[in-house]
Image (spheres, helix red, strand yellow):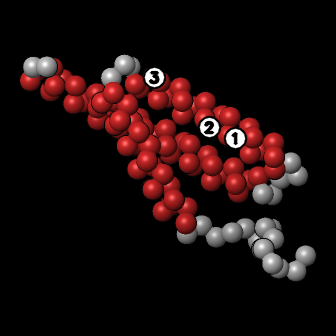
Amino acid sequence: MNRGAAMSEAPLVALAAMAGALLGGVFYGGLWWTVRRGLLSRQPAAWFLTSLVVRTAIALLGFYAVFGGDWHRLMACLAGFVIARVLVMRLTRAVPVPAELPLKGGAP
């Protein structure tokens, strides 16, 4: 590969990493939202199953669209996805548990 081709590929790899971060934010943010809503629902299994299918479909379709046959973009997208996981975990860690949720081991 010549130097010009490598230089023109760099912005695409950076965009793939940003797309991966966006996909990860949607996937893990959606998981966080689902857990909070599903635990308060009368049908939590429906929430969790639907969320799993929708989040996985979005992630797979997004990875496929970004991939475009280039493993560099796939790896950049995956790295962005993993970074988003860390960020979502840090951002949602400090969120208090709603008062409506029963605490494990507490009185009914």
The residue carrying mark 3 is 65
Would residue 73 be found to the left or right of residue 45 on screen? left
Q: Is residue 34 visible?
A: yes
* Dot 2 and dot 1 residues touching (CB under 8 Å): yes
The residue carrying mark 2 is 55
Few, some or many residues within 10 Å of mark 2 (<14, 14–19, 20+): some
Residue plotted at (69% across, 49% down): 34
Question: Which residue type carries mark 3?
Answer: Ala
- Of residues 101 and 70, the one nearer the viewer is 70
Q: Earlier in the sequence, mark 2 or mark 3?
A: 2
Q: Position of residue 37 (x, y in %)?
A: 74, 53
Residue plotted at (45% across, 56% down): 86
Element under disc 3 = helix
Q: Which mark is residue 51?
A: 1
Few, some or many residues within 10 Å of mark 1 (<14, 14–19, 20+): some
* Dot 2 and dot 3 residues touching (CB under 8 Å): no
Q: Pick the quarter of the image with the C terminus.
A: bottom right
Question: Which residue type carries mark 1?
Answer: Ser
- Of residues 38 and 60, the one nearer the viewer is 60
Residue plotted at (68% across, 34% down): 53
Q: Position of residue 12 (x, y in %)?
A: 28, 27
Q: How many numbered marks does the figure carry?
A: 3
Q: Pick the quarter of the image with the N terminus.
A: top left
Question: Which residue type carries mark 2?
Answer: Arg
Residue 99, by quadrant, is: bottom right
